[in-house]
Image: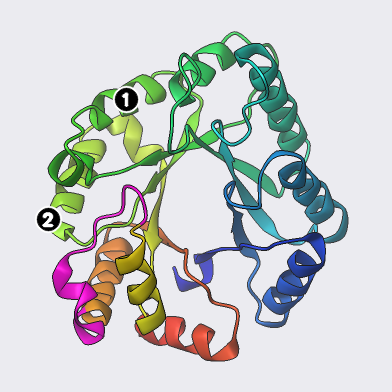
Amino acid sequence: MINNLRFELSFKDLAQLEEKLIFCKLHRIYNINIPCKGHIKKEFYKASFEFINKNFKEFDVVYHYSLFHQYARNRENSYNEFLNFYKNCNSYNNSRILLVSGSIKKKNYDAINVLNNLQYEKKLKYKLGIAYNPYLNKYFNFSLERERFEKKISSRLINSIWFQFGTDIKVLESEVNYLQNNDNNKKLSLYGSLLIPSKQFIARFKFRPWKGIHIADQYLNSLQDFNSFIKELICFYLDNNIIPVIETDFLSSKKIELIYRLFK
């Protein structure tokens, strides 16, 4: 399972992207995820896709396609742009898409709407990943996550589920059990977000919490407790065949060593 670890890669320009991909190669990291947020959106997002597929074909890449950040003037244009990106990914064996609505959903244009439209497209067999946040109901007063999941899954275009990070394993276990109660869902690949704690990360999170991320005060006040929880979460992921996705900075030999040490 540790060989299947995925790493999310952020960058400011193509030169930095190249530098970070070379670092990954040196450390035998070939499973990467490209987010669609911050600087990485619009034309730069598409340019990054083209750059990787031209120069680093040996990488297995999952592109987080944010319908919010890639919105282009109106719903029709936005859908056509996504469809073109979808087809381009389909032409590369090393490229996949994690489809996300985005932090702010556009009216009548979110993951459910897009999946509904894709069902009527001909000759498209490419499968997509979808995000799932187990903690929304308990910690963010949003009770529709299961309902939205069922609508997405009904499209029959889904092959993977990507769990959001949180620090309540009982809630996570309950949601994983719910998803796996359906035999059809057992065929889906499962991925789980993993944040590697540090004093710097905790300070930044306290100052500006990430939207939709639940981290208990206990872990924000104790780096030791946070690390202990991460080891527990890793065990849960591995016991349930959930592939971890490292979403915090890993780009130094010291940080790589720390990550691998957590898996021992």
The residue lying toward the viewer, choosing from 158 and 212, is 212
First in residue order: circle 1 vs circle 2: 1
Callout 2: helix, strand or loop? helix
**Which amino acid type is marked by label 1?**
Arg
Quadrant of the image containing the C terminus: bottom left
On screen, 75 above or below 56?
A: above
Dot 1: within a 10 Å radius of its alpha carbon, few (fewer than 14), some, or many (20 or more) residues? few
Q: Residue furthest top?
A: 120
What residue type is disc 2 on?
Lys
Task: Identify the residue shown where x is 37% and y is 81%.
Answer: 198
Q: Give the quarter of the image for residue 239.
A: bottom left
The answer to which image quadrant residue 183 occupies is top left
Where's the N terminus, which quadrant? bottom left
Label 1 residue SS: helix
Q: Which of 10 and 89 is in front in this view?
A: 10
**Magenta span:** 210-225
The residue furthest right is: 54
**Distance of label 1 from label 2 (alpha carbons):** 21 Å
Q: Where is residue 245 in the image (x, y as percent from the top left)?
A: 46, 61
In the picture shown, does residue 16 fall above or below 260? above
What residue is disc 1 on?
148
Q: Nearer the viewer, residue 116 or 218?
A: 218
Which residue carries the number 2 mark? 170
Residue 124: image location, x then y, percent: 67, 21
Residue 66 vs 114, above or below: the answer is below
Whether the magenta-drawn stretch holds residue 114 is answered as: no
The residue positioned 49% from the left and 13% from the top of the image is 116
Q: Where is residue 136 in the image (x, y as percent from the top left)?
A: 23, 41
Q: Are marks 1 and 2 in contact (CB under 8 Å)?
A: no
